[in-house]
Image (cartoon, rainbow, N blue to C red):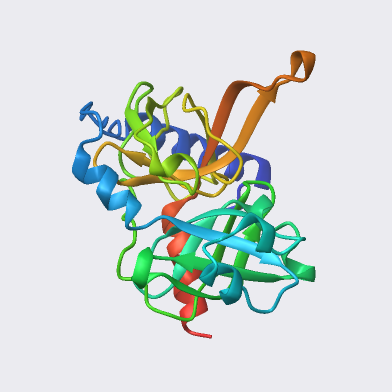
């Protein structure tokens, strides 16, 4: 018996995969269209986190002076971050860490007397998806659970943002496109949202009405006629959640 030529064997495999995909059950749609409630806003406020990228090795003096503009590090850059585990891992946008190789990256986590700060270690970056993971050297008991990767999140699903700037305001919005359910072959998914975000929100969490993490803010676009910025659109980036957790599990074993 002669083996099948590669081209025929590959065609059979591909045809089988397409058949399985066609026969596979459709992923369920998330049907909860409830707007965010007061408890969800409070939940997000407890998790608002910031990344500050600067050459300064210590920013505690600036923090102690109430984040005074006049005392801020002159080269300070950064954005928001989203705590995603209890042991110090944060998801953010890759572009927030643009200058991190030449500078220190500091995390601010918590509020008031519970505010904690430290330099973080960059675990993973992906410029293509504009996603990154950093780890702080302290526990993070207040963190976000991901919205189910097995659900399809439909256009119009109510959302809100938990970033450093907009996250402190009750500004609700909706997904501007459908986000399909994930499988092992999915890479990160880009999606538009209709919340007018601001500088400082990059890397901040995009959340369902029940404060489940869908993804993080990736970009804010503005149209600038006559030197007056007018908001046009914001985008989010949703990681492949199972792949992301494998990256984190591997880092824990270091």
Residue plotted at (46% across, 80% down)? 252
Q: How many marks?
A: 0
| Residue 37 picture location, percent across and down | 20, 36
Q: For this rendering, which residue is in front, 1 or 83?
A: 83
Residue plotted at (31% across, 64% down)? 142
Q: Which residue lies furthest to the top in this view?
A: 226
The answer to whether 136 is drawn above or below residue 109 in the figure is: below
Q: For this rendering, which residue is in front, 152 or 142?
A: 142
Q: Which residue lies furthest to the bottom in this view?
A: 254
| Residue 26 picture location, percent across and down | 30, 30
Residue plotted at (48% across, 84% down)? 253
Q: For this rendering, which residue is in front, 235 or 165?
A: 165
Q: For this rendering, which residue is in front, 1 or 19?
A: 19
| Residue 239 picture location, percent across and down | 49, 49
Q: Does residue 250 appear in this view?
A: yes
Q: Does residue 182 appear in this view?
A: no
Q: In this view, does 48 lie to the left or right of 96?
A: left
| Residue 244 picture location, percent across and down | 48, 60
The answer to whether 234 is drawn above or below residue 106 in the figure is: above
Q: In this view, does 204 lie to the left or right of 113?
A: right
The answer to whether 66 is drawn above or below residue 2 in the figure is: below
Q: In this view, does 135 lie to the left or right of 140?
A: right
Residue plotted at (46% across, 33% down)? 18
Q: In which quarter of the image is residue 62?
A: bottom right
């Amino acid at each position: 018996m002669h083996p099948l030529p590669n081209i025929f064997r590959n065609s059979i495999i591909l045809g089988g995969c397409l058949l399985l995909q066609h026969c596979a059950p459709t992923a369920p749609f998330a049907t909860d269209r409830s707007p965010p409630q007061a408890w969800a806003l409070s939940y997000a406020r407890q998790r608002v986190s910031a990344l500050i990228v600067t050459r300064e090795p210590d920013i505690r003096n600036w923090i102690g002076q109430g984040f005074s503009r006049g005392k801020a590090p002159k080269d300070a850059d950064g954005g928001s971050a989203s705590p995603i585990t209890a042991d110090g891992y944060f998801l953010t946008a890759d572009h927030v860490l643009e200058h991190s190789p030449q500078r220190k990256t500091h995390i601010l986590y918590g509020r008031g007397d519970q505010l904690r700060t430290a330099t973080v270690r960059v675990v993973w970056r992906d410029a293509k998806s504009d996603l990154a993971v950093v780890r702080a050297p302290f526990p993070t008991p207040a963190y976000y659970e991901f919205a189910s990767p097995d659900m399809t999140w439909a256009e119009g699903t109510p959302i809100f943002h938990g970033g450093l700037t907009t996250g402190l305001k009750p500004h609700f919005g909706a997904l501007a496109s459908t986000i399909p359910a994930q499988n092992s072959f999915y890479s990160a998914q880009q999606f538009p949202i209709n919340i007018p975000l601001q500088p400082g929100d990059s890397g901040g969490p995009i959340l369902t009405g029940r404060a489940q993490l869908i993804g993080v803010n990736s970009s804010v676009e503005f149209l600038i006629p006559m030197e007056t910025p007018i908001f046009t659109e914001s985008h989010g980036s949703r990681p492949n959640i199972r792949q992301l957790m494998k990256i984190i599990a591997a880092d824990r074993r270091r």
